[in-house]
Amino acid sequence: MDLFKTWLVEKYIAHRGFHDSESPENSITAFKKAIENGYVIELDVQEISDGTIIVFHDASLSRMTGQDGYVRYLTKADLKHCYLNNTKETIPTFEEVLNVIKGQTPIIIEIKNNSKPGKLETKLVELLKNYKGDFAIMSFNPYVLKWFKDNHPNIIRGQLSSFFKSEKLAFLKKLILKRMILNKVSNPNFIAYNAQNLPNRFVRKYKTLPLLAWTIRSQEEYMKIVKHCDNIIFEGFQPKI
């Protein structure tokens, strides 16, 4: 499949849905607004203590819910008490989100997994087994991509990367991840790179793969980056060209 001729390049990608003050990131209403505006939806998934896969970005609850504690200790029953940014929206399960989107627009699923791949990924594939719609997965963890390559090679997979300047990572790990050295192992179908680090010599050798730039937050930023990428993951404005 030539991904340069698919939705991955041809439709703008709304970062955690098309969110605003009334529709928080990774919320059902943000996903509905993305559908209404014809955007691809990017969202984050992670597993909580009872094995439920939820749609939520952070490891901590504080930024999005004002509560103390870590997301991984939640149960499905707790989700209805986790209100997002002082709205009536609560943390959704991945299954709930799929039932809302229903193939109306493509989805890019960022897998938040710093552990050994397999458990979360198997559950994710099971939920997607009968889903009628376009989707792709992506992750910063190259071993997540390798798991998909080995077990479900037909699922489109993308390598997320950055220079990781503000991340607390060992120097060698940063070097390997920013240079995408493990792409030889994970064999991604596309690259999603931090726009603040583009252009760079590490992405140039992957000219045969679509390059997504994240996260673009204004039309001005978009116009600066557009010549260096094939598509953008955006938030906070409506891109036009």
Image (tube, helix red, strand yellow):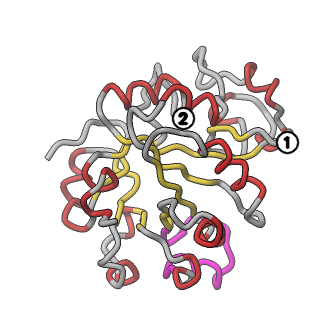
Tell me: residue 77, above or below residue 203: above
Q: Residue at x 34, y 54 (%)?
A: 8
| Residue highlighted by disc 2 | 26
Residue sitting at the far top: 88
Q: Nearer the viewer, residue 48 or 238?
A: 48
Q: Position of residue 182 (x, y in %)?
A: 57, 82
Q: Which residues are magenta?
A: 161-180
Q: Is residue 47 above or below residue 183?
A: above
Q: Earlier in the sequence, mark 1 or mark 2?
A: 2
- Mark 1–mark 2 distance (CA, rounded to whole Å): 20 Å
Q: Looking at the picture, which amino acid does disc 1 mark?
A: Ser
Left or right of 6: which side holds 95? right
Question: Circle 1 is placed at which residue position?
Answer: 49
Q: Residue pushed farthest left?
A: 241
In the rendering, which numbered label is found on residue 16?
none
Total marks shown come to: 2
- Near mark 1 (Cα within 10 A), the count class, few <14, some 14-19 or many ≥20, is few
